[in-house]
Image (tube, coloured by chain):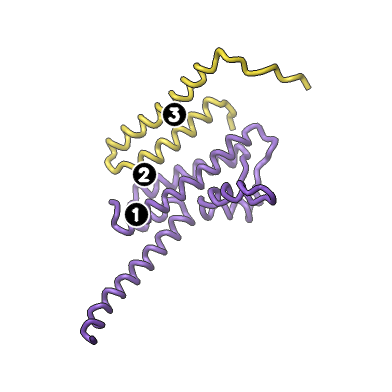
Amino acid sequence: MPLSHGLLMTLYALLVSMFFAVLWKRHPRLQFKLFLQLFVGMVGGALLLAWLMYPFPSGPPTPFP
Amino acid sequence: MSEAGSQTEPGREESQQLNARVVATLLAAWLVPGAGHLMLGKLRRGVIFFVIVLTAVAVGCLLEGNLYRVLPNQPLTILATLGSMGMGAPYFILRFIFGYQGNIVAAGYEYGSAFLLTGGLMNLLLILDAWDIVRDRKA
């Protein structure tokens, strides 16, 4: 199983967006529209937050074991 | 008096049939993700929900996430366990037949736990959706 943070986040966003799109909307066109809104909102929001946090230091480096 | 009784009898029978249908639908919806929708004739949605919830659970297991169980002196695990149990039969199959419990030192433990818990919570929402459909509150 690949352990890329980005890939797992995208997979999670994909499943949750699909789920709520089918749960909340009945028409396929509206489902697709809501899916896109949720998916782009989640992945884009996470990337935006990561970009905003980029200048801040993440703390001291982990000591080598 | 007897006329009034004879008028209410069919209504009561109908109400009992509806209640039995509601209980059967909710039980099926809990045990197998999407089964409630399938029982109500929502074939496409039932299959999609089944695939989504089981994919979330399968990814969670592959990442060796935590399948929550109640731990002493940790009250929050009660809520997490109830949420995970929402996935229905897969929870009990994983826990009692396969003895699955996750691996806290696995690299994907936190992500896996999120996937497993999300699978359970999604199925709880599906039960509520099936409840609305069977009571004719939703299409």
Q: Can residue B126 be seen?
A: yes
- Please provide percent x and percent y for residue A21: 36, 38
| Residue at mark 2 | A23
For the residue pair A63 and B112, the one nearer the viewer reads as A63
Q: Residue at point 53% right, 55% down?
A: B89
Measuring 56% from the left and 26% from the top, which residue is drawn there? Answer: A5
The chain identifier of the residue carrying mark 2 reads A
Of helix, strand and loop, which one carries label 2? helix
Secondary structure, mark 3, is helix
Chain colored yellow: A
Chain B, hue in figure: purple
Left or right: residue A56 compared with residue B31: right
Dot 1: within a 10 Å radius of its alpha carbon, few (fewer than 14), some, or many (20 or more) residues?
some
B8, above or below B78, in the image: below
The one of B51 and A37 positioned closer to us in this rendering: A37
Residue B68 appears in the rendering: no
Residue B122, percent across and down?
Answer: 46, 45
Residue drawn at the location 62% of the way across and 18% of the way down: A58
Q: List x then y, in percent, for residue B79.
A: 56, 49
Chain for mark 1? B
In this view, the mark in front (2 or 1): 1
Between residue B46 and residue A39, name the one nearer to us. A39
Compute the Cα span from label 2 to label 1: 12 Å
Give neighbour class at mark 3: few <14, some 14-19, many 20+ (Cα, 10 Å): some
Report the disc number at residue B132. 1
Q: How far across and down, in percent of the image, does residue B58 sit?
A: 54, 42
| A55 in relation to B24, above or below | above
Q: Mark 3 points at which residue?
A: A42
Type of amino acid at the residue the image marks with label 2: Leu
* Residue under the image location 58 percent in, 54 percent down: B93
